[in-house]
Amino acid sequence: MDWAGKHVLITGATGFIGQHLVRRLAGAGARVQAGSAPDEKPEHIAGLPAGVQSLVFDLRDAGAVRAAVRSSPTQTTPQVIFHLAAVGVTNPTVNPLNALAVNTRGTIHLIEALREQPVKRIVLLGTCHEYGAREASEGLDPFSAYAASKAAAWAFGRMYWRAYNLPIVTVRPFQVYGPGQPEHTLIPAAIRAALAGKDFSMTSGEQERDFIYVEDVVDGLLAAALASSAKGQSLDLGTGQVHTVHYVVEHIWSMTKAQGRIKPGILPYRPGEVMHLVADAEHTTRLIGWQAHVGLEEGLRRTIDWNRRQVHR
């Protein structure tokens, strides 16, 4: 699809992945509506690309969601919707009722607002943590309120596809990283400590994760929006390869020639920590033709370079 002139709505548009997706689509000439929550920082909204329409609404308010869906200056419904908005993404102690209200009920509000509209695709962003300790082929077993609320949103999306033939697809990114990620998360925190010559306290780092660069995730979202074979499906966005957290931190230290010390074992694992998460990348490739292209070495180099530029601003 040529995205030029296409009407696209992105919820969670000022988040880490959302910012990259907005920039990609705006640069391709799409008519982008960027949704954000009422408590979003004004500077994040102000940082949206020129020509992007900002929409501020609360997913917990069904009326506000309906109004947002119909708020285009041309009074047309978006052709493609990317639903990225969520709470608890990096907060393992998120209140379960809040996660349910925003992540599950908010998804239902959005789908209901779109149910009788001529949309071409609704892409729901899930999470690899819905699998818990299981392999992707073994089904879902969420271990946190955030993951459970996303699994419930997936179930409702699946139901709306079956009951109403809505063109819904769920994508589950794995360990996403890249420029612009919140500083308190693993890779940017390690990079900032390395560049500053500081010690870095961490868990023992034995968790195995499928690290995927954010621009590959954007490619996967766009592919999921286009592929006719994706409707009703659930797709993993990952590389199919795992590295331990400790290995990645050591690699950052090597690439930056950091002077501080890595201090594994200082921090405890989270309650219910899953030790192995890897995407079924082959299934996604078979279904929509997408695969990750940025390897860990290149992705870390780009992310380190971006962080260096931020430090020297």
Image (cartoon, grey):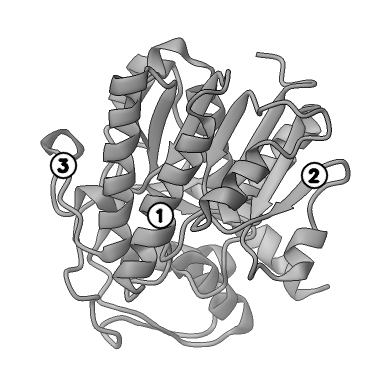
Quarter of the view holding residue 310: bottom right
What residue did someone put label 1 on? 103
Q: Residue at x 30, y 81 (%)?
A: 264
Using the image, determine if residue 91 lies above or below residue 214: below
The residue lying toward the viewer, choosing from 152 and 227, is: 152
Residue 136 lies left or right of residue 285; in this view the side is: left
Looking at the rendered structure, the kind of residue marked 2 is: Gln
The CA span between labels 2 and 1 is 23 Å
Dot placed on the residue nearer the N-terminal end, 3 or 1 = 1
Q: Secondary structure at mark 1?
A: helix
Looking at the rendered structure, the kind of residue marked 1 is: Asn
Instruction: Report x, y in % for residue 45.
Output: 76, 60
The residue lying toward the viewer, choosing from 152 and 5, is: 152
Instruction: Report x, y in % for residue 198.
Output: 54, 87
The mark found on residue 53 in the picture is 2
Residue 116 lies left or right of residue 168; in this view the side is: right
The residue lying toward the viewer, choosing from 243 and 112, is: 112
The CA span between labels 3 and 1 is 23 Å
Q: Say whether marks 3 and 1 touch (CB < 8 Å).
A: no
The residue lying toward the viewer, choosing from 24 and 305, is: 24
Quarter of the view holding residue 307: bottom right
Residue 194 lies left or right of residue 31; in this view the side is: left
Dot placed on the residue nearer the N-terminal end, 3 or 2 = 2
Looking at the rendered structure, the kind of residue marked 3 is: Glu
Instruction: Report x, y in % for residue 293.
Output: 51, 32
What residue did someone put label 3 on? 135
Crowdedness of circle 1 by 10 Å Cα count: few (<14), some, many (20+)? many
The CA span between labels 3 and 2 is 40 Å
Q: Say whether marks 2 and 1 touch (CB < 8 Å).
A: no
Dot placed on the residue nearer the N-terminal end, 2 or 1 = 2
The mark found on residue 273 in the picture is none
